């Protein structure tokens, strides 16, 4: 496999992950699964959505590799798989220096503003 092919696959996987995370319902499902496995009924409980709609959201999360479904008799619990989230974190980390630099500049501005506020006001000219 070439580096170009590997990069294309990684890019496609990130695209799927970001697409899955773009929906607030799917993010809420992942947040619930971060607390432990759950059935589709348990995942659907807080939403005003049908079970088929929740199942579609779960399928999107499964396709992105964020959720796996087990099988124990008739119970098919969903669990979170954080691997794609680690990949997103790794991708975002490459840009950390940008926001660190911006926060450093903002800290400088705040320090300048604070030092200006603590100085005594200049003598004002006599006003009539």
Image (tube, rainbow, N blue to C red):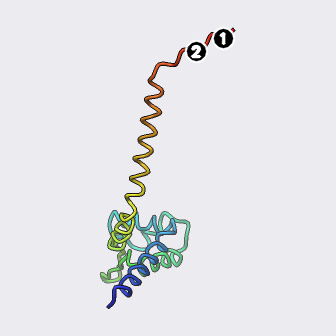
Q: Is residue 87 left or right of residue 109?
A: left
**Total labels drawn:** 2
Q: Is residue 122 left or right of residue 71?
A: right
In percent of the image, x 36 and y 79: which residue is there? 69
Above-or-below relation of 102 to 26: above
Q: Residues within 10 Å of mark 2 (few under 14, many from 20)?
A: few
Do labels 1 and 2 touch, CB within 8 Å?
A: yes
Q: Residues within 10 Å of mark 1 (few under 14, many from 20)?
A: few
In percent of the image, x 42 and y 75: which residue is there? 14
In percent of the image, x 52 and y 69: which residue is there? 23
Image mark for residue 19: none
Counting from the top left corner in percent of width and height, residue 18 is at 46, 72
Q: Quadrant of the C terminus?
A: top right
Quickly name the residue at label 2: 124
Element type where label 1 sits in the image: loop
Image mark for residue 127: 1
Above-or-below relation of 4 to 89: below
Q: Residue 113 or 64: which is nearer the viewer?
A: 113
């Amino acid at each position: 496999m070439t580096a170009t092919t590997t990069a294309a696959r990684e890019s496609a996987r990130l695209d799927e992950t970001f697409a899955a995370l773009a929906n607030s319902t799917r993010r809420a499902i992942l947040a619930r699964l971060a607390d432990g496995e759950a059935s589709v009924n348990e995942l659907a409980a807080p939403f005003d959505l049908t079970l088929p709609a929740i199942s579609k959201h779960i399928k999107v999360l499964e396709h992105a590799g964020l959720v796996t479904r087990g099988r124990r008799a008739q119970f098919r619990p969903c669990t979170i798989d954080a691997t794609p989230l680690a990949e997103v974190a790794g991708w975002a980390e490459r840009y950390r220096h940008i926001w660190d630099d911006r926060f450093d500049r903002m800290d400088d501005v705040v320090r300048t503003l604070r030092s200006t506020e603590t100085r005594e006001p200049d003598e004002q000219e006599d006003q009539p």
